[in-house]
Structures are given as structure tokens and as C-alpha cells.
Amino acid sequence: MATIAQGQLAGVLADGLIDVQAFSSALQSAITAGQSVYSIALGVSGGVNQITFSAPLNQADSAVLMNDLIALAAKLTQSWTAQLTAL
């Protein structure tokens, strides 16, 4: 039987999986439509300063970046799914 904490973690992981899938789908749509990346801002907890990038990339470089982000999202999905399964 799962503990309350495990149930809460399962909910957070499930919500994260839904969000990651939506994020990946949006990026794939942008790649398919030939859209370009104009800016990115990344905030990281733990004392790391926000990373901001704002210089338009060409379409090919944008596709490479977005595909790399999709690959990262896939790794997160694998990790979170394994954690969820372990609960």
C-alpha cells in the first residue's frame, strides 16, 4: 500500500509527464511548420542565474535545438516513468 507521500509524488510525476508530452508536441509542431527560435530563458533553482538567449536562429539551427529539447524531454519522461512505476 502506498503512503500519502508516495501518492503525492505519483501525482506530481503524472502531471509532469503530461506537461512534458505537451511541450514535446508543441516543439514538434514548430519544427514541422518550419518555425525559428527567437529567444529562450531558462530558470534553474539552487542559486544558478537565469540563462537568457535572444538572437534569432536560422531555421536549421532552430530545428536542431528543438530536436535536442525533445530528446531531453524524452529522457525526463523515461526517468519519471521509471520512478512512477517503482512506486
Image: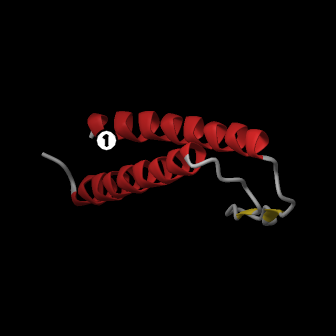
Q: Position of residue 20 (x, y in %)?
A: 45, 50
Report which residue position mark 1 lands on.
84
In the rendered image, the residue lying farthest to the front is 33
What residue is drawn where x is 70% and y is 64%? 43
Q: Residues within 10 Å of mark 1 (few under 14, many from 20)?
A: some
What residue is drawn where x is 41% and y is 55%? 16
Residue 54 falls left or right of residue 86: right
Q: Position of residue 71 (x, y in %)?
A: 57, 35
The quadrant the C terminus occupies is top left
Q: Secondary structure at mark 1?
A: helix
Q: Of 12 and 35, which appears nearest the observer?
A: 35
Q: Of 20 and 45, which appears nearest the observer?
A: 20
In the rendered image, the residue lying farthest to the right is 55
The quadrant the N terminus occupies is top left
Residue 72 falls left or right of residue 29: right
Q: Position of residue 29 (x, y in %)?
A: 50, 49
Q: Position of residue 14 (x, y in %)?
A: 31, 52
**Image vertical order of residue 48 relative to residue 57, above or below:** below
**Image vertical order of residue 70 relative to residue 7, above or below:** above
Residue 55 location, quadrant = bottom right
Q: Of 13 and 41, which appears nearest the observer?
A: 41
Q: Amino acid at mark 1?
A: Leu
Residue 37 falls left or right of residue 76: right
**Image vertical order of residue 86 relative to residue 3, above or below:** above
